[in-house]
C-alpha cells in the first residue's frame, strides 16, 4: 500500500555467505556505476579482504576474505563504511531518477494565476448552473446528449490540458500520471451522465494548481531578494587608495571594497585591512558578532556591526556563499514540486480496476446497464473527495492555530517522520541574549551598581551584549548613570567616564590588554561558562569590578515539547547549529537530545539532512534563519518557527509556525497523524462499501438508481468524516 516503506538506500543485507565468502546486496549500487573500480579497490585495500567484485546490475558486492582474521559481521561493517562515503552521490542520483519518473506531469506552477482564477470562476458558475438545471429539465439520456450538455462541454474544454498531459504520459513513458487518472474520472463521469462530478474534479485540481503557483511565486520572489544581498552599489578601493561608488554587478574577483559600519558585505573574500565586528547570523546562525581582522574570511550577506574593513573579493555574484544557499533552495524546491499526492497514488490502483471489472461484466452478461452501474459505483470519487477534504480541513485547522502548511503532501510526510533536527539560535533559543548573572568581584560594588556602570559604558552601542545589558537596567527601573568620553574598541570592548571613574566593559582579551588581574573572578567565570553563558567583564582604574553572564535563553516549553515529540514517536532528536561546540553541547545536554553538531555552515546542515535521508529515515528540520534555508528545503518537511524567523526561511520551509511556542511542533505532528488515520479510515470505508455495491451490481441485485444512492451515500459519509478535522483542537493534547 501507499504507506509501505522502501528499503534504506544504503542498507546492506547479506544475500549469501560461506566461510571466507559473503555476497552483500545494497540498493545504492545502482547509482554508483562510475565508482565501481574505486569501490572495488577500496574494499581490496582492507586488511581481511582478498578479492572483491562489485556488480551494479545485480546491486551486490561479492567479497572473499580471510576467515581467520575477520568474521562475516566485521566484513559487512567494512562494506557499509566504504559505501557510506558515497551516500550523498547515491542519494542525489536517486532523487534525480525520481524526478525523471514525473517528467510528463504538467508544470502547474508555470500557468499564470489570472488564468487559474478564470478557470475556477467558469467551473463554479457551471456547477451552479448544472444544479439549477437539474430541477427544471431532465438529464440527457442519449450518448451524444451527455457529451453535448453545457456542463459536459465546459468540463471537456477545461480538461483539455489534462487529457493532453495524460495521453502524452501514456504515449511516451507507458505509465499513467495524475492527469491520466483525472482524465479517466472526468470521462467516466460524463459517460455516466454526471458531468457535475467531472466539474468538481476539475475545480479541486484548479484550486491545488492555484495554491502551488502562489507558493512558488512567493518562493521565487524571496530567492531574488536574497540573491541581491541587500546592496545595489559598493565602494571599490582604487590602487591609489581612493574610493569609487560602483554597481554591484561591475565587481570582479580581486577587486577591493570598503565596508563601513551598518553595511552588508557583498562578496566572499578576505579582510585586507582594518577590523570590524561582523554579524554572521545569516550564514552561521551565531547571535554574537565575530571580530574580523586582516587575512580572515568574510561572507556575502553578513553585516558589519561596528568598525570598517577593506575586503578583497574572492567570489562575486552567484559564486558567493549566499548564492550557493539560494541554489540549494531552488534545487530542493524544484524537486518537491514533482511529488504526487496520496490520492493520486490510491486512485492509480483502483481506477483501472473499475474499467476492467466493467469490461468483464459486459463480456460475461452482455448487459450494458450492469457494466455502467459499476462505473457509477467507482472507488476514486469517495477516495479523492474525502482525502482532499481531510487534508484541506487539516490545513485550515492548522492555519487557525497559527500554523501555515504549504501543501497537503507535507502532512503525509510529517506523519511518517522519525528524525527531527533543531537549529539552536532563534529556534530552540529566543534569539535575544539576556543578562542572567551579575557577580561583583569583592565588596566594592553591589549588583545594582555593577550593572549600572556596565550600562553606562554600553548605552550607545548596538552590540547584542550591550543591548542586553542596557535592557536589563531599564527593565529593573534603574537609571543609567551619566557618562562622557566613550571610546569603542572594535570587537573587544568599550570604556567611558562615570563620576570621575574610567569604566571599562568588554571581553577577557580586552581586560588582559589593559593588564587587569582576573583572578578574583576566575571561579565565577568557570561556573558561568559551564552554564553556557557569555562572559562580560567590568573594571575601573583600580581593577576588576565584576563579571556579567549573558545568555540566549531557551524558549519556554522547549523541554516539554521535546518530551512530547518522543511520546508521539520521534526516534532521533538532533541539535544542528553554527554556534560554538561548548554552547551546543550544553543545550543538547539540558534538552536530553540524542546528538548534536556544532559550527555547521548552511551547506553542512543540508549535507547532514541528506545523510540521514540516505539511511532511510524521514527527516523534519526546524529552523528560523537564512542559514537554515538549505536544510529546511532538503528535509522531508522543513518547519520555520518563531517571530525571529527570516522571510527566506519561511519560503524554504514547508510549514511555518507563526508563534514562538515550541509545543506547536508536536501539535502539528499530532494533527498530521490524526489526518492520516482519518484518510485510512475513509479508504477502508469507501473500498468496502463500493466493493459490496460492485458485487451486487454485477449479479444484477442492485439497480442503477440504488447503486447511485449507495455510492453517493458512502461518498457523503467519508467526506463528513473528513470534515471532522475542521473541529480538531490542536492544543487539546498539549495543554
Image (spheres, rainbow, N blue to C red):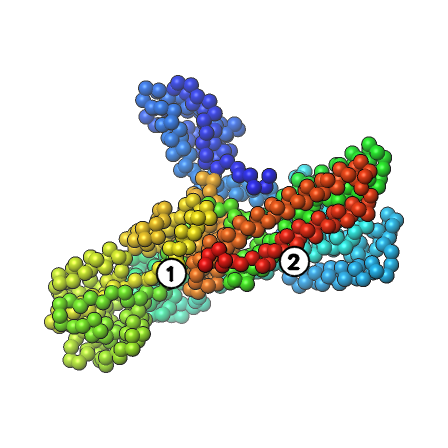
**Residue 275, image x, y percentages:** 27, 64
**Residue 430, image x, y percentages:** 37, 62
For the view shown, which residue lies furthest in the top direction? 19
Give SS at disc 2: helix
Quadrant assignment, res 291: bottom left
Residue 240 placement, left or right of 90: left
The residue lying toward the viewer, choosing from 549 and 212, is 549
Q: Residue at x 77, y 41 (%)?
A: 374
Q: How many numbered marks does the figure carry?
A: 2
Q: Residue at x 68, y 42 (%)?
A: 687
Residue 110 placement, left or right of 291: right
Q: Residue at x 59, y 56 (%)?
A: 725
Marks 1 and 2, how far apart at CA: 37 Å
Residue 370 versus residue 218 in the image, above or below: above
Residue 555: mark? 1
Residue 239 placement, left or right of 5: left
Q: Name the quadrant of the N terminus.
A: top right
Quadrant assignment, res 351: top right
Residue 220 placement, left or right of 208: left
**Residue 146, image x, y percentages:** 84, 51
**Residue 68, image x, y percentages:** 32, 19
The residue lying toward the viewer, choosing from 242 and 158, is 158
Q: Residue at x 49, y 43 (%)?
A: 92
Residue 256 versus residue 144 in the image, above or below: below
Residue 236: mark? none
Which residue position is annotated with label 2?
207
Amino acid at each position: 500500500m501507499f504507506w509501505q516503506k522502501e528499503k534504506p538506500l544504503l542498507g546492506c543485507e547479506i544475500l549469501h555467505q560461506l566461510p571466507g565468502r559473503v555476497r552483500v546486496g545494497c540498493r545504492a549500487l545502482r547509482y554508483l556505476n562510475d565508482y565501481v573500480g574505486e569501490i572495488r579497490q577500496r574494499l581490496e585495500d582492507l586488511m581481511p579482504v582478498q578479492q572483491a567484485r562489485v556488480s551494479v546490475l545485480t546491486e551486490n558486492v561479492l567479497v572473499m576474505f580471510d576467515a581467520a582474521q575477520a568474521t562475516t559481521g566485521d566484513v559487512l561493517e567494512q562494506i557499509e563504511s566504504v559505501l557510506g562515503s558515497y551516500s550523498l552521490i547515491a542519494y542525489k542520483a536517486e532523487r534525480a531518477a525520481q524526478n525523471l519518473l514525473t517528467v510528463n506531469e504538467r508544470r502547474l506552477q508555470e500557468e499564470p494565476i489570472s488564468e487559474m482564477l478564470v478557470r475556477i470562476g467558469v467551473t463554479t458558475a457551471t456547477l451552479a448552473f448544472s444544479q439549477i438545471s437539474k430541477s427544471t429539465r431532465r438529464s440527457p439520456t442519449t450518448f451524444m446528449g451527455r457529451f453535448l450538455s453545457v456542463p459536459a462541454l465546459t468540463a471537456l474544454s477545461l480538461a483539455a490540458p489534462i487529457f493532453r498531459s495524460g495521453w502524452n504520459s501514456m504515449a511516451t513513458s507507458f505509465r499513467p500520471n495524475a492527469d491520466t487518472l483525472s482524465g479517466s474520472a472526468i470521462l467516466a463521469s460524463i459517460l455516466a451522465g454526471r458531468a457535475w462530478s467531472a466539474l468538481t474534479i476539475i475545480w479541486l485540481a484548479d484550486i491545488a494548481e492555484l495554491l502551488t503557483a502562489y507558493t512558488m511565486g512567493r518562493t521565487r520572489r524571496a530567492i531574488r531578494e536574497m540573491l541581491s544581498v541587500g546592496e545595489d552599489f559598493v565602494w571599490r578601493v582604487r590602487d591609489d587608495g581612493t574610493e569609487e561608488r560602483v554597481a554591484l554587478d561591475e565587481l570582479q574577483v580581486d577587486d577591493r571594497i570598503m565596508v563601513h559600519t551598518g553595511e552588508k558585505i557583498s562578496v566572499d573574500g578576505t579582510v585586507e585591512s582594518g577590523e570590524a565586528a561582523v554579524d554572521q547570523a545569516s550564514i552561521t546562525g551565531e547571535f554574537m558578532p565575530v571580530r574580523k581582522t586582516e587575512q580572515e574570511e568574510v561572507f556575502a550577506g553578513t553585516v558589519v556591526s561596528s568598525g570598517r574593513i577593506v575586503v578583497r573579493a574572492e567570489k562575486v555574484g552567484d559564486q558567493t556563499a549566499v548564492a550557493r544557499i539560494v541554489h540549494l533552495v531552488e534545487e530542493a524546491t524544484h524537486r518537491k514540486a514533482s511529488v504526487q499526492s496520496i490520492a493520486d497514488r490510491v486512485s492509480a490502483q483502483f481506477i483501472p480496476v473499475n474499467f476492467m471489472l466493467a469490461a468483464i461484466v459486459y463480456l460475461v452478461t452482455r448487459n450494458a446497464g450492469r457494466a455502467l452501474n459499476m462505473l457509477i459505483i467507482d472507488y476514486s470519487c469517495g477516495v479523492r473527495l474525502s482525502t482532499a477534504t481531510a487534508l484541506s480541513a487539516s490545513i485550515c485547522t492548522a492555519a487557525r492555530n497559527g500554523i501555515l502548511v504549504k501543501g497537503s503532501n507535507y502532512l503525509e510526510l510529517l506523519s511518517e517522520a522519525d528524525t527531527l533536527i533543531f537549529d539552536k539560535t532563534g529556534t530552540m533559543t529566543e534569539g535575544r541574549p539576556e543578562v542572567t548573572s551579575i557577580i561583583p568581584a569583592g565588596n566594592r560594588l553591589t549588583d545594582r551598581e555593577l550593572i549600572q556602570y556596565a550600562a553606562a559604558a554600553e548605552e550607545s552601542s548596538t552590540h547584542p551584549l550591550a543591548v542586553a545589558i542596557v535592557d536589563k537596567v531599564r527593565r529593573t527601573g534603574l537609571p543609567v548613570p551619566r557618562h562622557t568620553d566613550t571610546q569603542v574598541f572594535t570587537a573587544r570592548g568599550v570604556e567611558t567616564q562615570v563620576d570621575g571613574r574610567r569604566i571599562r566593559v568588554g571581553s577577557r582579551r580586552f581586560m588582559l590588554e589593559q593588564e587587569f588581574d582576573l583572578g578574583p573572578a576566575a571561579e565565577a567565570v568557570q561556573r558561568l561558562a559551564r552554564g553556557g553563558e557569555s562572559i562580560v567583564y567590568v573594571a575601573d582604574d583600580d581593577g576588576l569590578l565584576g563579571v556579567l553572564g549573558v545568555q540566549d535563553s531557551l524558549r519556554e516549553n522547549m523541554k516539554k515539547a521535546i518530551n512530547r515529540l518522543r511520546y508521539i514517536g520521534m526516534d532521533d532528536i538532533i541539535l544542528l547549529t553554527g554556534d560554538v561546540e561548548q554552547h551546543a553541547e550544553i543545550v543538547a545536554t539540558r534538552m536530553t537530545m540524542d546528538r548534536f553538531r556544532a559550527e555547521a555552515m548552511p551547506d553542512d546542515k543540508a549535507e547532514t539532512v541528506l545523510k540521514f535521508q540516505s539511511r532511510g529515515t524521514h527527516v523534519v528540520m526546524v529552523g528560523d534563519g537564512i542559514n537554515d534555508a538549505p536544510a529546511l528545503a532538503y528535509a522531508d518537511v522543513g518547519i520555520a518557527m518563531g517571530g525571529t524567523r527570516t522571510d527566506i526561511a519561511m519560503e524554504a520551509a514547508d510549514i511555518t509556525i507563526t508563534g514562538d511556542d515550541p509545543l506547536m511542533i508536536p501539535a502539528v505532528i499530532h494533527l498530521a497523524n490524526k489526518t492520516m488515520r482519518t484518510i485510512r479510515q475513509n479508504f477502508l470505508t469507501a473500498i468496502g462499501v463500493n466493493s459490496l455495491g460492485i458485487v451486487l451490481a454485477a449479479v444484477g441485485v442492485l439497480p442503477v438508481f440504488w447503486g447511485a444512492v449507495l455510492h453517493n451515500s458512502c461518498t457523503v459519509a467519508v467526506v463528513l468524516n473528513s470534515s471532522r478535522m475542521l473541529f480538531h483542537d490542536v492544543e487539546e493534547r498539549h495543554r
